[in-house]
Amino acid sequence: MNRDNPSIEIWLGGRMLDIANITKRDISIEDIGESLSKLCRFGGSSSKFYSVAQHSLLVCAMAEYVRPGDKKFAACALLHDASEAYVGDVRTPLKDAIAGYKPIEDRVHEAIRQAFALPYEKSVWQEVHILDRLAFGIEANTLLRGAAGQPFAVGPAEFGNALLEMRANNGHPVVNAPIPETEVSSLIWREIFPGEALVLFYRKFWRTV
C-alpha cells in the first residue's frame, strides 16, 4: 500500500490499522459502535456514565427533529464523532494544542464520510456542528458538576427553544413545549450503559444510513 504519511498504527477490531493513512476500506461500523458505546464523554468526569454513542444518538435525535425525514442529515449527526472510535475522545483545548492531531482526525472523518456515502457539503456539517454544540451545552448543564450557569452551559428552556427555532427555519411545524416530546429528552436524562448504547446505535445506523 502506498503511504502518503508516516505510519501510526493502532490495534482495533482484531487488526493493526494505520490511522495516518486510513481509507474508506478500513472503516467498520462494528469498530465504531463497539468503541463509542464504551468511550465515556467528558474524559469520564460526568456525574454518570455517558458515552460518546449516547451523545451521538442525542445529536441524531435532534437532527431528526429539526429536519424530519432527512435520513442523510440524521446519518451525519449520528456519525459526526465516529472518528473518535479511531483517535479517541480528546478534549477540544488539547486537540488544538497537539500538533498533528487535527489532520489525522480530519483524514479519519473523510474516510468515514466516504465509507458511508455521507454528504460532502460544508453547510450540512456546519448545521450538524450547531446541533453538536447545543448538545454539549445541555449535557454540560446536566452532567458536569458545577457547570450549570456557566457561559458554555445551556438550560432546558434555551435548549428546547433553539431546537424549535431550527425546526421552524427548516420549514417544519413546531410544537409548543420547552423540550420537544421526542426521544431527545430521554437521551439527555437517562443513563445508558454500553450494551444498550451499542444496540441503540446499531439500530439507528441501519435506519438512517
Image: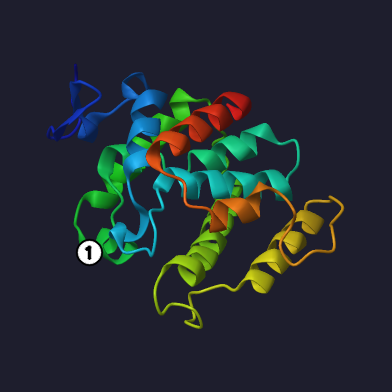
Q: Is residue 52 left or right of residue 120?
A: left
Q: Quadrant of the N terminus?
A: top left
- Residue type, numbered disc 1: Ala
Q: Residue furthest right?
A: 173
Residue nearer the viewer, 186 or 123: 186
Query: What residue do we see at 44% from left, 43% from top?
Result: 53
Res 189 visible = yes
**Residue at the (47%, 52%) spot, across then down:** 191
The residue carrying mark 1 is: 97
Camera sees residue 107: no
Q: Identify the image's colour scheme: rainbow, by chain, secondary structure or one colour.
A: rainbow
Which part of the image, by quadrant, shows the C terminus? top right
Q: Residue, x 17% and y 34% (percent of image)?
A: 5
Nearest the eye: 74 or 175: 175
**In the displayed structure image, the side of residue 129 where residue 99 appears, left or right:** left
Coordinates of residue 80 in the picture (x, y in percent): 47, 44
Query: On the image, which quarter does residue 13 sit in?
Result: top left
For image coordinates 58% across by 41% down, the residue present is 121
- Residue 147 vs 86, above or below: the answer is below
Which percent across, then down, holds residue 103? Answer: 29, 46
